Amino acid sequence: MYHIIEQVSQIQLITKMLHKPDGYARIRSQFIGPLSYPRMIFMDLSFDEPLCLDPEYRNVLTTPFPSDDQKVLVYPLEELLAEKMRSLLERGKSRDYYDVWRLLKEHYSALNFDLLSQVLSKKLEHKGLILHNTSDFIPRDIRTLKRYWEKELEQQVDVLPLLDKVLTGLREEMDKLVFPHLSFAVPNSVEQ
């Protein structure tokens, strides 16, 4: 696959690390573009996540691709957001909180929240996770999240907002936009 990318884009890819624990793979690849400046691509691949919606082609919005009509196959926004929300319940990494916040804040008008509910329900069921309310997405103790917020995101985000602002905004956006569409959430008193 790397040789095809190099032929099409003149970008050379070299795998620097491949780690395959159960159910997923973590790959770190160096890429060297036309200007010969090496950078890294970090990829996490899951082999245990159901794909609920068909991938779709989207325009590439950034360089180094030389043409405006280049397209890439991606998850629909509802699939991507459902994956990230599921990740919040399981691992709660800084990037997941940031990504869900940004998706809800900047792309809410492009989201079909009824479809999101269906996709999220399938993903939570697959993992055996139960959702009661938006508080389930927000960690009770944010000290660990605070400790890694800047460290994990500073090289990926130009202007990193404060964690407290993101968590407050995330709760508000989920309460307003997402939770009214979730018919599968289990009230706290029903949990066994």
Image: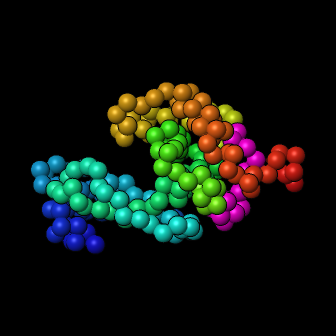
Quadrant where the image shows the C terminus: bottom right
Percent across and percent down for residue 54 are 48, 69
Compared to 39, does 149 lie above or below? above
Q: Is residue 120 visible?
A: no
Up/down of 64 relative to 13, above or below: above
- Name the foreground residue: 110 vs 26: 110
Percent x, y of residue 17: 36, 60
Height in image: 100 above or below 54?
above
Classify residue 155 as left or right of residue 120: left
Which quarter of the figure has residue 1? bottom left
Is residue 101 visible from the viewing direction of this image? yes
Going 29% across and 50% down the picture, which residue do you hit?
A: 61
Question: What residue range appears in magenta?
Answer: 120-135
Q: Residue at x 46, y 40 (%)?
A: 106
Is 128 magenta? The answer is yes
| Residue at x 15% of width, y 62% of height | 10
Is 178 displayed left or right of 163 in the figure?
Answer: right
Q: Is residue 173 magenta?
A: no
| Horizontal side, residue 43 vs residue 14: left or right | right
